[in-house]
Image (cartoon, rainbow, N blue to C red):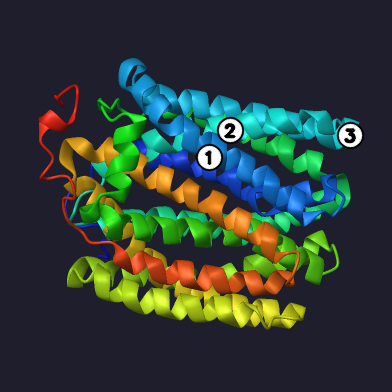
């Protein structure tokens, strides 16, 4: 009996985007876990300064998304990949100089380059992925991407930890730059997607707070709260707990990914067959929230592994349904897929800003671990999303220009 992962023919454009994304992900996977730790060291162990750094990046992101979308509507969305990848290469060049020369005066430039990457890379990526995946196979297509993410997350933290311990941060920054350079050429093969973004800043925020969109905005806000804490606070927490052992940080992070790798594939089949992403999301977010609460009580390396393993499994359940629902909802918006994507990005990064400010205040009164309770609430917020066309009632009179 032949094993067939997909049902029917898959859009070739999806595989071209997937191929380019894999190389980008390898570059990101090598450095992502250790960037907050690098900044923590650069700032002399001052966590408040790390949080302020990320707040600054996210302020620029929120300020720039609408402007960038309008620019890409003119020059073409595929050019966003070129700008985004080039800026992340320059970003790691600045980190190289900071690491080797102690040039901390370059931090503001790093903030700017990080924001430019976030603005110009993710907008075309999410729009393209919404267009190139199909309803029958969407969860499995996203599952394939997630599986590659998990594989890279399984191997690369160990490699990065060893390289940092032996050669320093500059080694992983240099390799990442080369990988991003390779991906730059691969993105040139991705087909062009023509979208015309027509919302102003005022219209964008009006739609975010519109009564019909409150559930959607709440879901994206919850996603932002959780992703900030998972991406910035948790790596520094385990680094401190393991007393600065880079190799141990990498090994334990990789091991907790291992337990969840195959679960994602099987769950993707189940979601595509049952078409019940919402029910899986409810279970997944509940279990994942419990994982964040459990992290409050982590005190040893073995705690990191066992609690991390449980949390990674619950994350797989949550993300399998969340990603499917998110891209189904994006696809349902039709010609408003780019507006939908901007709405998500603005809300997501606004959540990063707000939770960053809350963390700054919390650090004066509470220890780092209590921040994980906020992430537990953020995870539950994802349940507010619905797979439907949120913009079906919008009439062109709302806008200066009509969509074509």
Q: Is residue 157 left or right of residue 239?
A: left
Q: Nearer the viewer, residue 115 or 270?
A: 115
Of all residues, the one furthest to the top in this rendering is 75
**Residue linked to disc 1:** 24
Quadrant containing the N terminus is bottom left
The answer to which of marks 1 and 3 sits earlier in the sequence is 1
Could you say where residue 150 lies in the image, as x and y percent from the top left? 52, 60
- Name the residue carrying label 3: 102
Q: Position of residue 319 (x, y in %)?
A: 40, 64
Residue in the foreground of this view, choosing between 195 and 370: 370
Residue 300 image-quadrant placement: bottom right
Percent position (x, y) of residue 376? 51, 73
Q: Residues within 10 Å of mark 3 (few under 14, many from 20)?
A: few
The residue at the point 45 percent across, 50 percent down is 348
Q: Are marks 2 and 1 in contact (CB under 8 Å)?
A: yes
> In the structure shown, which secondary structural element does the residue marked by tag 3 occupy?
loop
309 lies above or below 85: below
Task: Please give left or right for residue 88 compared with residue 45 in the image.
Answer: left
Can see residue 86? yes
- Counting residues from the start of the chain, the first of labels 2 and 1 encountered is 1
């Amino acid at each position: 009996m032949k094993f067939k992962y997909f049902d029917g023919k898959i859009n070739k454009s999806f595989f071209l985007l997937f191929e380019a994304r894999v190389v980008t992900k390898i570059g990101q996977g090598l450095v992502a876990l250790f960037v907050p730790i690098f900044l923590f060291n650069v700032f002399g162990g001052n966590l408040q300064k790390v949080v302020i750094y990320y707040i600054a990046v996210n302020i620029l992101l929120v300020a720039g998304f609408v402007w960038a979308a309008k620019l890409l509507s003119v020059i073409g969305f595929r050019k966003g990949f070129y700008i985004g990848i080039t800026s992340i290469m320059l970003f790691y060049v600045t980190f190289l100089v900071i690491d080797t020369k102690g040039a901390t005066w370059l931090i503001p430039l790093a903030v700017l380059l990080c924001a430019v990457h976030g603005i110009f890379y993710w907008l075309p990526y999410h729009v393209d992925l919404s267009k190139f995946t199909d309803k029958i196979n969407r969860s499995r297509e996203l599952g394939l991407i997630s599986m590659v993410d998990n594989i890279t997350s399984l191997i690369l933290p160990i490699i990065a930890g060893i390289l940092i311990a032996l050669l320093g941060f500059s080694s992983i920054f240099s390799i990442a730059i080369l990988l991003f350079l390779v991906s730059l050429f691969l993105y040139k093969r991705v087909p062009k997607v023509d979208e015309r973004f027509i919302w102003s800043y005022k219209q964008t925020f009006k739609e975010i707070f519109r009564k019909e969109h409150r559930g959607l905005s709440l879901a994206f806000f919850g996603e932002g709260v959780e992703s900030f804490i998972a991406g910035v606070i948790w790596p520094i927490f385990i680094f401190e707990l393991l007393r600065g052992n880079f190799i141990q940080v990498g090994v334990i992070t990789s091991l907790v990914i291992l337990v969840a790798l195959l679960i994602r594939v099987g769950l993707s089949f189940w979601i595509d067959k049952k078409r019940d992403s919402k029910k899986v999301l409810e279970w997944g977010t509940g279990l994942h929230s419990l994982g964040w609460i459990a992290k409050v009580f982590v005190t040893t390396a073995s705690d990191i592994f066992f609690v991390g393993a449980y949390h990674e499994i619950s994350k797989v359940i949550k993300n399998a349904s969340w990603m499917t629902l998110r891209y189904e909802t994006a696809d349902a918006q039709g010609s408003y897929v780019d507006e939908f994507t901007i709405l998500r990005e603005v809300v997501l990064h606004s959540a990063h800003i707000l939770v960053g400010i809350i963390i700054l205040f919390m650090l004066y009164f509470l220890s780092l671990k209590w921040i994980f309770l906020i992430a537990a609430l953020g995870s539950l917020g994802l349940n507010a999303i619905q797979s439907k066309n949120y913009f079906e009632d919008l009439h062109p009179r709302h806008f200066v220009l009509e969509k074509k």
